[in-house]
Image: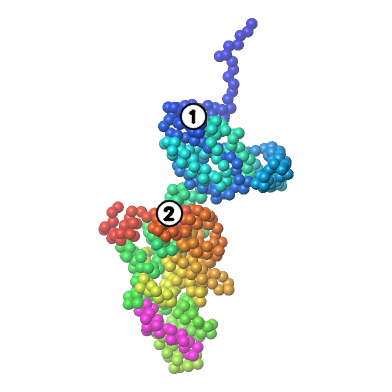
């Protein structure tokens, strides 16, 4: 008789998957706690109290917004998923059976109205899935989800459980598998084995499964670039490499006190540290002092006199980059500025003024053939010269003068009157500094003059960049709604033109406003130029604002904010300081909740206004 001893038997060959599983078992034995105790509603693992919930009875329609709230769960709550592809023939069989069973419920006298409505919903859902399987080759998956909770004591465990149930409730139910707590606990372990499969499985199509990945909103994290702040959802740093984007334009909106200026300051400092040229139009006088501390140029434009940018200047074209005739381009710009001064200007008046401007420049020896690079700033006419020239026309050509008589009266305020020290004079500032702030705080509450100054500065900056060396530059237009004149949309159209053209000259433009309604008020029969400006900006930051402004954004720009996003954006009295610097940040189609965070040095410069020698590194 032949004996076969057990230790001589051929060992059964393991699959690769089984070998990994056994290896995992060994590792788990080494890492396991000193004791595990299974109770009816929890498992004690060492000194921790754990509960593994199974997710069941999903809604027939999964809403991604609800699923993404899973990311709001605390760090000691884990979400586990098992996903396997499901045989389509088996799916069809189950769906057909579901339709049959629910159809019987519809006609049963023992089922109430609520039950019949639920049955009808199940039938509709099953038929839709059958259609997708039959005509769209839709893949189906067996989806299972568990949620594992860890706490220091039972009280904390119960509180966290209620939190989980509240978040999951809108799209599914969570159950405590009271007789199989240890199996559920084991299913949480990283060994790839679901021991409560029969409690958790749910067939889903690919679209429904995709809603669970990722749980949180998009990360915005490039390998290099500008640090924008902290992702409030994930806690990760937000880094944007705008060299990879279509343009460097950005749009910022937020009411007073929302952190808008702080964000702009942060953005300027970080781009400046990367070697970019920074130019800002500063209507609140916030940035000039800091710029001067850092060696920058603080250009103060005041009714009392001081710095002047001559509107009649024709910038030098040192690099031969600008196309067309500089004199004709300057006259076109001046006519737009004159419309801001005198909004009721007619086309005929504009034609007459364009002719007179050509004559004025000719009087100063400047024609289309003149090499403006050879001229000094004192060679150009100033506002007073044009005012006196119109007086001469009054004497020499009364008929022509009659067309511009009212404009001549308006011009007096800018040439000799209240605003003369702002507009009348030769340019007396050097703006070649890589850090320039145009401080126009002294013109606050003088909206009409502010608008003209804005345009004069924008046109000067635009010419400077077009004729420059294409060094990376960012232009910030704070309180940009001031330029939005409903009567003269040409001014906002000019901003739109700048953003379209300057991106080719290595320049980004950042308009910022606290009033979206005013910003979108500049429009004509062709387009809304405020909206056109916003559409040019690849990056956008929406900081807290009034609810009416949020509604306006949704209506005019087609945004659809979730309830959670509206909560972030809606300013709440009494919580304004807490909300400051927190908003919704867009880069193209991606969006996140962003919190602005200054470095220690930035805080000292911005909030404490320290000089360089006082900085504590």
Give the camera-side residue of 403 and 28: 28
**In the image, which is nearer the foreground, mark 1 or mark 2?**
1
Secondary structure type for disc 1: strand
* Residue carrying label 1: 38
Question: Which percent across, then down, holds residue 610?
Answer: 29, 60
Question: Mark 2, residues whose alpha carbon is within 10 Å: few (<14), some, or many (≥20)?
Answer: many
Q: Give above or below for 114 relative to 527.
A: above
Q: Which residues are magenta?
A: 401-430
Give the camera-side residue of 109 and 556: 109
Which numbered disc, 1 or 2, marks the residue that appears first in the sequence? 1
Residue 415 highlighted magenta (yes or no): yes
- What residue do we see at 42% from left, 27% from top? 34
Q: Give above or below for 139 relative to 363.
A: above
Residue 504 shows in this picture: no
- What residue do we see at 51% from left, 45% from top? 166
* Residue carrying label 2: 595
């Amino acid at each position: 008789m032949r004996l076969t001893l057990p230790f001589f038997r051929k060992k059964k060959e393991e699959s690769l998957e089984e070998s990994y599983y056994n290896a995992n078992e060994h590792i788990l034995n080494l890492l396991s706690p000193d004791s595990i105790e299974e109770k009816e509603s929890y498992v004690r693992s060492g000194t921790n109290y754990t509960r593994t919930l199974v997710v069941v009875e999903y809604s027939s329609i999964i809403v991604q917004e609800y699923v993404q709230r899973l990311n709001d769960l605390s760090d000691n709550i884990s979400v586990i998923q098992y996903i396997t592809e499901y045989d389509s023939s088996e799916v069809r069989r189950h769906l057909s059976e579901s339709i049959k069973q629910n159809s019987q419920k519809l006609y049963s006298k023992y089922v109430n109205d609520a039950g019949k409505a639920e049955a009808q919903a199940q039938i509709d859902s099953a038929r839709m899935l059958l259609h997708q399987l039959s005509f769209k080759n839709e893949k189906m998956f067996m989806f299972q989800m568990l949620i594992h909770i860890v706490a220091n004591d039972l009280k904390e465990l119960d509180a966290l459980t209620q939190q989980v149930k509240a978040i999951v409730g809108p799209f599914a139910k969570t159950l405590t598998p009271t007789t199989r707590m240890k199996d559920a606990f084991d299913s949480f372990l990283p060994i790839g084995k679901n021991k409560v499969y029969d409690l958790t499985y749910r067939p889903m199509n690919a679209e429904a499964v995709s809603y669970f990945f990722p749980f949180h909103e998009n990360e915005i994290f490039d390998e290099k670039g500008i640090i924008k702040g902290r992702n409030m959802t994930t806690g990760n740093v937000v880094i944007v490499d705008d060299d990879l984007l279509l343009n460097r334009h950005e749009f910022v909106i937020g009411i007073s006190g929302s952190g808008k200026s702080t964000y702009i300051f942060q953005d300027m400092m970080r781009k400046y540290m990367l070697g970019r040229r920074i130019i800002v139009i500063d209507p609140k006088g916030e940035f000039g002092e800091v710029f001067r501390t850092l060696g920058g140029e603080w250009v103060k434009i005041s009714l009392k006199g001081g710095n002047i940018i001559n509107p009649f200047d024709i910038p030098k074209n040192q690099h031969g980059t600008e196309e067309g005739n500089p004199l004709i381009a300057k006259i076109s710009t001046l006519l737009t500025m004159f419309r801001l001064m005198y909004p009721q200007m007619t086309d005929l008046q504009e034609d007459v003024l364009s002719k007179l401007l050509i004559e004025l420049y000719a009087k100063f020896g400047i024609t289309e053939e003149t090499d403006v690079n050879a001229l000094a700033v004192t060679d150009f006419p100033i506002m007073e010269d044009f005012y006196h020239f119109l007086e001469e026309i009054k004497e020499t050509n009364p008929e022509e003068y009659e067309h511009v008589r009212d404009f001549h009266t308006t011009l007096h305020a800018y040439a000799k009157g209240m605003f003369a020290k702002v507009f009348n004079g030769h340019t007396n500032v050097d703006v070649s500094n890589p850090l320039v702030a145009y401080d126009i705080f002294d013109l606050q509450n003088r909206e009409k003059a502010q608008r003209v100054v804005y345009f004069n500065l924008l046109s000067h900056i635009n010419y400077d960049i077009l004729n420059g060396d294409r060094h990376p530059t960012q232009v910030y237009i704070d309180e940009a709604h001031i330029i939005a004149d409903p009567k003269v949309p040409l001014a906002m159209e000019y901003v739109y033109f700048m953003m379209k053209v300057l991106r080719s000259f290595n320049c980004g433009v950042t308009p910022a406003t606290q009033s979206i309604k005013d910003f979108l008020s500049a429009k004509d029969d062709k387009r809304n130029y405020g909206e056109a400006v916003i559409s040019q900006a690849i990056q956008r930051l929406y900081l807290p604002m009034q609810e009416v402004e949020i509604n306006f954004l949704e209506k005019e720009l087609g945004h659809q904010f979730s309830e959670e996003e509206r909560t972030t954006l809606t300013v709440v009295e009494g919580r304004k300081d807490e909300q400051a610097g927190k908003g919704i940040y867009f880069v193209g189609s991606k969006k996140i909740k962003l919190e602005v965070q200054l470095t220690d040095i930035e805080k000292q410069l911005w909030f404490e206004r320290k000089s360089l020698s006082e900085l504590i590194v």
